[in-house]
Amino acid sequence: MIGVARAAAILGLMVVLIGSARADGDAARGEARFQDCAACHKLEAGNNNVGPSLHGIFERKAGALSDFRYSPAMKRSGISWTPESLDKFITDPQAMVPANRMPYAGMANPGDRADLIAYLQKMSK
Amino acid sequence: MTTKLKEVDVVIVGLGWTGGILAKELTEAGLKVVALERGAPRTSENDYSLPNIRDELRYVVRHDLMQNTARDTITVRNNPNQEALPMRRLGSFLPGEVVGGSGVHWSGHTWRWTDMEFKIRSNYEERYGKKFIPDDMTIQDWGITYDELEPYYEKFEYVAAVSGKAGNIKGQIQPGGNPFEAPRAKEYALPPLTPILASEMFSEAARNAGYHPFPRPSANASQPYTNPDGSKFGGCQYCGYCQRFGCEANAKGSPHMTVIPIAMRSPNFELRTHSWVTKVLKDSDGKRVTGVSYTNVLNGEEFEQPATIVLLCAYAINNVHLMLLSEIGAPYDPVAQKGVIGKNYCYQTGAGATLFFEGKFFNPFMSAGGSNATIDDFNINWAFDRAPHNFVGAYNVSGGFNTALPIGYRPVPSGTPQWGSEWKRATAKWYQTAMTISASGSVMANRYNCYDLDPTYRNAFGQPLMRMTFDYKANEHKMGTHAAQVINDIAKSMNPTKLNPARARTDPWTVVPYQSTHNTGGTIMGPNPRDSALNKYLQSWDCHNLFVVGANVFPHNASYNPTGPVGAFAYWVADAIKNRYVKNPGPLVAA
C-alpha cells in the first residue's frame, strides 16, 4: 500500500511538473522561438493569416475570433488561453486538441516554450 | 469587341516563379507592371490550409491546380510519320494553372546546372571527338557560363529557402555535400532536412559501393526561416504532401508566399487573374512587339493590353505555343532543319527499383519533397567515362521517397495480382516495408523531337493546338540500360527480401502515366540567331522588347530538375532589363 501511495504521489508530482509552465521565460530569446510560429501567425490585431492573429491571446478562449475559420475541434475544446494551457498545447498540439488544424508537430523543450510564452505575453497585448 | 487598354511598361504572361520574380524586381525598379494569369487567385490562408489540403482525390486524381485539358491541350505523336492525337487528360506532365503556377505544386528540388550542360557540345567534342555525337543529335552550347549564373542561383536558393549541404564552397570540397557540384560562394540557405530511414539505408549502400551520397537540396525549409525579402517560412513538418499540393506549413518555397505578395503590395503592380493571353502583338515591321491580346475566361470579354516590354513567363509548353501562334521567329522544320521556334523539345528519362524489407518500418507517410539521398557519380562527374557506354548525357540516382500518398502509394512485389483479395493482402503486408531507388536521366536534343502547330485540332479559342513530336532515341535507351544496372547493383547489395528490379525504358514514349513535368526547349537560347530563338538574356532575336523565360529556353534537358536554373534565369533577366535594357532599349547581344 505504501508503494502505491508513493507511486501516486510521484505521479501527482509529475503531473504538476508537466502541467505548469515555467515562469522563468526570457522574452528576448522567445522572439527567436516565435520564428516557428511567424510563418502563419501575426501579432497585430485583426491580422489573420494561415493561423489566427495572436493579439490578445491570453484574454480569450480558444476558437473565439469571429473572423477566423477554426477547426471544429478547436472550437469545441473549451480552452481558455493561459500561459499554462498554451504551454501544454504547444508541447504537442494534437495530443491536447486532437484533429485541430494547426500543422505543427510541437516544441519539445520546456525552456524554449517558456521563452516563447514570455515573448507572447509581452507582445500580444 | 476588343477593349484596348492603357499602355503599361511591362506585361507579364503567367504568374508563377519566373513571372513572380520579374514582377517583384521590375516593380521595385519603378516600372508599371501588369501580370495576366490564366488561373485563379489562391492563397495559403484560404486554399492551402486544412481542411482544403491533404486531399489526394482533389489534387492528384482530379488535378485541381493544373491546366484544364477541355480548354487547351496538346496533340502528341512519336515521330513525324504518325498522326498526332489530342491529350484529352493530363498524364505524363502537369502544367500548373493558378497564381503561383507550377511553383505551388512542385516538390522543391533545386539544383544548379553547370557548364557540363551549358557547354555540352564543346565538352563532348573535346573529350570524345566530333563523331561521338550522333548526326541527328542537335545539342548545342547555351551561350552562358556557370560563373555568370552563380550569383543568381544563390539569390533564388535564398529566396526559396533551399535546404541542403554544400559540397564545394569556392573550390573547397565539403564533407557531407555533393563533391561533384560546381563551386558555390556560400552554404545553402538552410541545413539539410532530417533524413528518413530509406535515404539512410541507400546512402550507406552507395558509400559501400564507392559512391558519394548527399542530401538532395530542396526548397523545403528544414527550420523556420525568414528570407532576404522578409518572407516568412515555417519549418517542414514532413507531412509528405509536397508534390501536387500547396504547402500548409508555408515551408515549401513557392512564389505565392514570397515574391508575388511583395509585388502585390506595390502600387506599380496589377494582377489580372482568369486572363488568357491568345497572342503577342507585333508592330507593322515585325521588329518589336506592342502588347498582347487576352480573353477574360469568366465572361469571354476580349482585351488588348499594350506594353513597352512583353515577358512570356507561362509554363514552358505554353510559352512556345504563344510564340508559334504569334508568328514571332521562324517555325522549326525538322525535315529541312530550318527555323528555330519549336526546336529541341526535350523530356527526361529514368528507371526505378522497389525494394522490400520484411520487418522494416519505413513510415512512408512521413517524408518531405527533399528527403531522398542522391549520388551524382554518373551525372556531373567527368571521371565517369561515357566512351565504353557510348551515350551522351547523365543521370542521378536517389534513394528514399518524397511522397507516398494513401491512395496511390501501393507498393507490392512483382507477380502480385493487380486486384482482388490477394492484392489487398499484399498491399497491407508490404506497405511499411518498401523503399525505392530511382534514376532521373537527361534527354539530348534530337532533330525530330520538336513542337509545331497541329493542322487539325483547335482549342477553346479556335486556335491550333500545339503538336508535340517526341520519342526516346538510342542514346537514351543506352543510358537507361546503364542506370538500371547501377540501381540494381546497389539494390542487391542491400539484401532486400524482395526486389522489383529497375528496367531501362525502351518502349516508345507515351503520354500516360505521369512521368515528369520537366519539359524543356522549343524557344531555346544560344549564341546566334541561326540556331536559337533567344540570346543569353532570353531576349528574342527577332523582337528586342520580348523576353521569354522558363525551361523552354534550355537547348537540351539534363538529369536534374529544372527549377534551379529557371529561377536563376528569372533574376538574371530581371537584372538585364533593369540595369541595361531600360536605359538603352535594343538588342542586348549583337546578332
Image (cartoon, coloured by chain):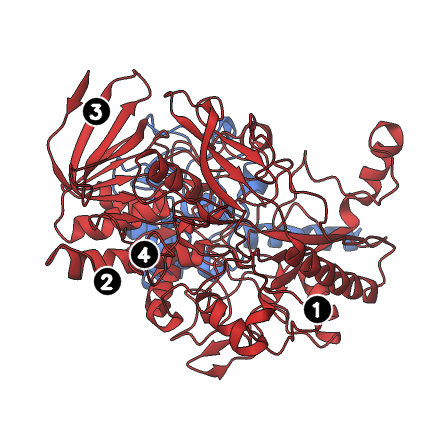
For the question of whether residue A29 can be seen, the reply is no
Question: In what element is the residue under mark 3?
Answer: strand
Question: How many angstroms separate mark 1 from mark 4 (CA)?
Answer: 34 Å
Query: Which residue has dot 3 on it?
Result: B303
Q: Calculate the distance from the C-alpha at mark 1 to the C-alpha at mark 2.
A: 39 Å
Residue B589 image label: 2
Where is residue A113 shown, x and y percent of the image?
A: 45, 56
Tell me: residue B133, above or below residue B335.
below
Q: Spatial distance from mark 3 to mark 2, Cα to Cα?
A: 33 Å
Q: Earlier in the sequence, mark 1 or mark 2?
A: 1
Q: Are marks 4 and 3 on the same chain?
A: yes
> Looking at the image, is mark 1 or mark 4 earlier in the sequence?
1
Residue tagged 4: B529
Q: Nearer the viewer, residue B517 or B144?
A: B144
Give the mark nearer the N terminus: 3 vs 2: 3
Can you tell which quarter of the image residue B423 is in?
top right
Q: What residue is at 25 percent from the left and 42 percent from the top?
A: A44
For disc 1, the marked residue is B389
